[in-house]
Image (cartoon, grey):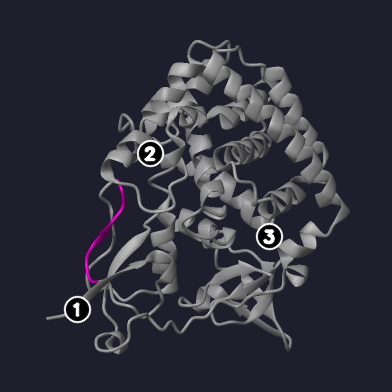
Amino acid sequence: MKELMKIKTSFAEPGMTIGKDVYSSSDYLIAGEGAVLTDRMITRLKFYSVEEIIIVTPANLRKKEKKPVYKNKPVIIPEASSYVGRIKASPEYRTFTTTFYSSFVSYKEQLNEVVQNKAPLNTESMLADVSKIFAACKNPNSLLDMMMAIRNLDDATYVHSMNVALICNLFAHWLKYDEEETEALTLAGLLHDIGKMMIPSSIIKKPGKLTDDEYRIIQEHPALGYSILKDQKVDPRIAKAALQHHERCDGKGYPNKLTASEIEPFAKIVAIADVYDALTANRVYRGPICPLEVIGIFQTEGLTTYDPGYLMTFLDQIMYSYLNYTVKLSNGETGRIIMMQRNQLDKPVIALSGDRYIDLRDYPGLTITGIV
């Protein structure tokens, strides 16, 4: 009889064998019993926020050893020489952080007034703060760099909402929205998680796995957000985005299991920005997932879950922003992205040392694991 053990997904390694079927929160089979883990499968588990899995106990742990001995030791790159470290050392980053923190404090104070004292929203002030953040960056690519680096604030809900608003603003420009629609979509991003402010912080900030009851409480935040925003003087699409940003086009979202035609377009856009920022951010239960890994999973897993038109617009724009970036591959080598493949955005052509070039489409097991 095979021996099983439970491990954190963050400790999963290629070659381990799944001991029990792994399902998403919406009962979608992610990995079946007996499957041998690959880098790609591990990224899928993270994409679906699976925090723990059951594996077949490795042979070297069945007798005397008490703790797993993992082959894959993380390579620690000194921050000063890492990509994020170089961003943080730039004058632009110092300007950005000053502006971001100032806007963040103002935004947090106003939301607290709205939720606790039923104060009216000052949307002009909120939009002015977002504009200041954009003004602190040279271009959209620079904004994405800054957002990648500023991941150390404790107030995850507020920072996440600010980041989603910034992505929504970029989204509006990619879709060529007029000024009024751009402002409304930006506000939808800012306010999509306002309902979380009515959820106990002990649940929001819990480092371990949520109980079934706690997860049900978390799932109330879209309806709570809608109840706050429906009586405010805001575009109705903003309130709908708060209510529906966890709905999915395949009908497996919540709270009402709506399908594609029933979901407000703003909610579809916010959903994409929401998931992208959540996965690429630090969380108390895991580190950030490489943006390029997230993009690959979105393309292969997300076209039935998210609106394909909005998703491909997002992926095209985001992925091409990483041209010429130096990346680390799953085999330990580093190289520079020199060409994108639209049909497989996570499989670009990479220039390696020694005048070598590889097309990742020709190497199914080789993936990009980080930006360096």
- In the image, is residue 318 above or below residue 134? below
Q: Quadrant of the N terminus?
A: bottom left
Furthest residue in direction left, as rendered: 1
In what element is the residue under mark 2? loop
Classify residue 224 as left or right of residue 24.
right
| Residue situated in front as seen by the camera: 317 or 169 | 169
Crowding at mark 2 (Cα within 10 Å: few <14, some 14-19, many 20+): many
Q: Which residue is mark 3?
A: 322
| Residue situated in front as seen by the camera: 204 or 250 | 204
Q: Quadrant of the C terminus?
A: bottom right
Q: Which residue is mark 1?
A: 3
Crowding at mark 3 (Cα within 10 Å: few <14, some 14-19, many 20+): many
Picture coordinates of residue 16, whole percent (x, y): 33, 78
Let me know if residue 278 appears in the view. yes
What amino acid is at disc 1? Glu
Question: How far is the residue under mark 2 from the one under mark 1?
Answer: 37 Å
Picture coordinates of residue 154, whole percent (x, y): 60, 45
What amino acid is at disc 3? Tyr
In the rendered structure, which disc, 2 or 1, sits on the residue that comes first in sequence? 1
Residue sitting at 44 percent across and 64 percent down? 43
Residue sitting at 27 percent across and 39 percent down? 213
**Which span of residues is magenta-colored?**
19-25
- State yes or no: discs 2 and 3 in contact (Cβ < 8 Å): no
Residue sitting at 60 percent across and 12 percent down? 120
In the rendered structure, which disc, 2 or 3, sits on the residue that comes first in sequence? 2
